[in-house]
Structures are given as C-alpha cells and as structure tokens.
Amino acid sequence: MIHRPRILRASASIRKIVQETILQPQNLIAPLFIVEGENIEEEIPSLPGYYRRSLDKTLEEVFVLFNLGIRSILIFIKCPDERKDNEGKEALRAEGLMQTAIRAIRKHIPEMIIMTDIALDPYSMYGHDGIVKDQEIDNDTTIKILAKMAVSHAQAGAHFVAPSDMMDGRIAALRQSLENAGFHNTGIMSYSAKYASCFYGPFRDALDSAPGFGDKKTYQMDPANRKEAIKEVLLDVHEGADIVMVKPALSYLDIIREVKNATNIPVSAYHVSGEYAMIKAAAQKGWLNEDQAIMETTLSIKRAGADLIASYFSKDIIRILNNL
Ligand code: PBG
C-alpha cells in the first residue's frame, strides 16, 4: 500500500496540524435583538438561550462579546405595534431605538464593528420588508426609504449597513446616498442571496415581524435556484457591496461555495434562527450532543466558503473553542 490516509488521522495532535478549516472568534457576527425599556432581558421562547434586551443590558452584552474576541454585531430592534406604519417613519427617526443604540454602543465600545439591519419589516404594519401598495411590495419607493435609513444609521455611527430586504437596486441606492451624505467609510454588507425560507420563523417571533398577508416570495429567492444567486451576488458587487451574504446557511452550503468562487470580496453566511432552534430542540430532547452539533455545523459553513458567520451560537462557539 502506498497511500494510507489514516496516517494523518492517527492522533489528536496529527489531526490538529493538518486541520484545514479553523474557526476563530473574529469570524463570528453576533446578532442582537434590542427592545425599548430598561433592565430587560427576556428569553425568546422559540430561541431558547437567546434574549431580547433593553439597551442598558445590550451594552453589558456587547462588552462580554468584545472580551470574548468577537468584533462584529448585527443589530435588530423590536418596534412597538403603535409605531408601525406603511412609511417607515420610525425607521428614519433620529431618536429611534436603532439610532440611539448605535450611538450608545459606538460610544461605549468603539472598536466593536456595528452592523445594522436595513429593511422595513420590524417597522411595517404589514410585516413586509417594503412599502405595500395594492397588496404588492413597491420596489422603487422602498429603496428610497432604505437609502435614507442607511444614512440615518451612518449618522448615528454604524460601521456597516446590512440590507436584508431583497429589493432590486438597493445597493446602488444605498451607496449613492451614503456618498452624497459624505459617509465614505460606511460599508455595505448585502444580504445578496436571501432565500424565502421557513427557517426565519423564530426570528419573526423575536421581533413580532411575521408578514400579515401573503409571504415574501416576490422578493426573497426560490430555494430551488442556484444560478439566480450568482446573478444577485454579481449585481450587488457591481452596485458597490463590500461584503455579500448567503442566507440561510445550512440548506445553502452549495450556494456559499459558488458565491465564494464567483467573487473576490468577503462572503458571509447567516446561520439563521430556525437552524439554531433545530439544534437546541434536538439537544433538549437528548437526541444530539449540542456542543458537537454546534461545532460541526459552524465548521461546515466556514468550510463551504464563508469568511464571516452570523450565528446565535457565537458565544457557545467561543466557549467550546476555549475548552478544546
Ligand atoms: C428581515 C430579516 C429576517 C431575518 C433577518 N432579517 C427575516 C425575514 O426576512 O423574514 C432572519 C434572521 C433569522 O431567521 O435568524 N428583513
């Protein structure tokens, strides 16, 4: 026998020196859900072990994340029902929770990279990512508002804006508005290939943002499509995206790899709420070893080609890495 591949698997040390994919804290983006009020830390029922926090508690959490080596957070806010409308008014308010949170985090932990969600669904009385006209999502009106939203986040101090809405032409619109407003250093992480997925369920519970009518299939992508993902990604690169994203991650590992091969900018992947909930639920039943499931799935996302991974398991991953 000339080839004995088992030689490279014979001991923990050998396995370690030939390990191809290595997860590091700086690969992780920690999503955070912020609510109005004070001293609030409420567990999200469909995301066990994950919380909605008021801003004071969020600041404490961001300190913890930074000390663990995490360098980026992706923030979402929960908007009270009475301030939801079909115009995105609350999304643009300079004293809104998002803008206030950005300013506070930037002030207290200046080195943490703040990425902000750009989409109207948390603020929409219809739970849709854009402005609704005659039961349809009006693309061109929406991107004008999203561009204002991006400028408002940049004004508050966001390092990156992260449009998750899947409207056409929004990256160009955001980039142009940021340039016009003098924000030459604000990055754009685009949710370029975002699929219409059932795995967003727990997230919509967290923000109370489920669509009130219909679904999101006229803007989010069909899970059957692969070439279309590359089309979306190349458009976003052309329009000025700094980082492109594939979302969800686990059912779309093939897409992550193709996007990685098709571009020369960083690729991120969002290991979404439903993917987290599946592992949590199986672990609670004793059907899976939670820590092993976390590491295997997260490694697979990085191996597929993701440079950055948005994950509700970020803290767990670092705890596990530190104990290896
Ligand atoms: C909304 C948005 C969603 C997620 C991130 N931004 C939900 C949706 O599109 O309905 C999902 C994230 C997750 O499930 O973890 N624009």
Image (tube, grey):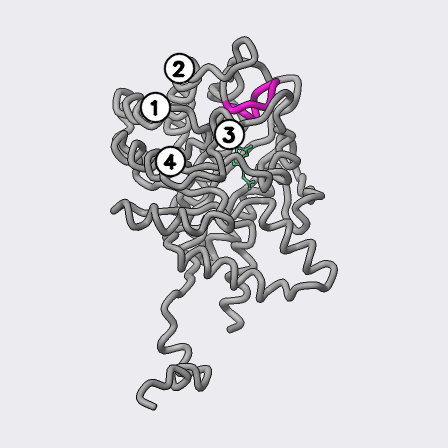
Q: Secondary structure at mark 4?
A: helix
Q: Amino acid at mark 2?
A: Asp
The number of numbered badges drawn on the structure is 4
In the rendered view, tell whether residue 296 sits above or below residue 130.
below
Residue 59's disc is none
Of the numbered discs 1 and 4, the one sitting upstream in the chain is 1
Magenta segment main secondary structure: loop
Residue 213: x and y in percent read 63, 20
Q: Which residues are magenta?
A: 120-129
Residue 231: x and y in percent read 33, 35
Residue furthest to the bottom in view is 1
Q: CA distance from mark 4 to mark 2?
A: 21 Å
**Which residue matches tag 1?**
169
Q: Is mark 3 within 8 Å of ligand 1?
A: no
Residue 140's disc is 2
Of the numbered discs 4 and 2, the one sitting upstream in the chain is 2
Q: Amino acid at mark 3?
A: Met
Left or right of 318 in this view: 282: right
Q: Amino acid at mark 1?
A: Gly
**Which residue matches tag 3?**
98
